[in-house]
Image: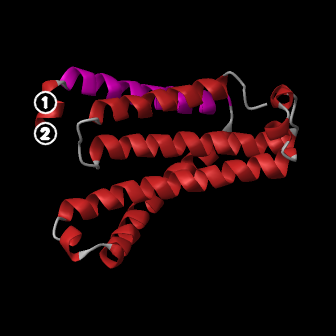
Amino acid sequence: MGRLIEDRPILDLALTLTMFATIGCFVWVLVTGNQMAALADFAASLVGAAIGIPTIKFLSKCVYDVISTAKARKKNRNRRKFGDQAWQGVIHLGVAIYEVHLIAAHSDWAWWNDAKTIWEPIGEVREQALRRMYMLQVGIWFATALCHKFIDAKHKDYFVMYAHHVVTIGLIVLSYFNNWVS
């Protein structure tokens, strides 16, 4: 898979620069807009991802050693792939659970049952919780993109997945700055 990156260095560089530019602009706007609580939430999500990803990878590889067959354990690639997918699954499941909690606890399921309520003002407490969810998402997607670029093994779908991460970061950031939080 090494040739995959070597064949398209301009695309790889463009995606990487776009990702860092988006996050740089995001942080700059938070700082200049005096949104320190949002910046703290973003930093916390990055720290959580930096601690959580290696921890989940390690634990998932331990689980793999217990649940896999002897034949599967002969290929170290299987263990690595299991770890790479497990941490993503755990993080995305955790975020999904937080989002369900956010909808249930802060809206009495109104968002779920009545689509018109999505655009109604949600109040300060709910707005803070939603802002925290945005920061969590941006932090996790940025950490995931960094792992995809610098840590995880490169696969045939490297550029598709990398573009997916960069576009997702951009969509979350644009949504936040268009004030779709409140």
**Quarter of image, res 80:** bottom left
Q: Which residue is mark 2?
A: 2
Residue at horizontal 88 percent and vertical 38 percent from the top: 123
Q: Is residue 54 visible?
A: yes
Compared with 125, 7 (above or below) is above
Q: Residues within 10 Å of mark 1 (few under 14, many from 20)?
A: few
The residue closer to the viewer here, 28 or 140, is 140
Q: Hey, what amino acid is under mark 2? A: Gly
Magenta includes 52? no
The residue closer to the viewer here, 21 or 176, is 176
Q: Is residue 37 visible?
A: no
Q: Which residue is mark 1?
A: 6
Q: Hey, what amino acid is under mark 1? A: Glu
Residue at horizontal 68 percent and vertical 35 percent from the top: 35
The residue closer to the viewer here, 20 or 153, is 153
Q: Which residues are magenta?
A: 9-33
Image x and y of residue 174, in percent? 59, 23
What kind of element bears circle 2? helix
Compared with 83, 151 (above or below) is above
Measured Cα–Cα span from mark 2 to mark 1: 7 Å
**Quarter of image, res 61:** bottom left
In the visual, does 90 lie left or right of 111? Answer: left
Looking at the rendered image, the quarter that the C terminus falls into is top right
Residue at horizontal 68 percent and vertical 45 percent from the top: 132
Main secondary structure of the magenta stretch:
helix
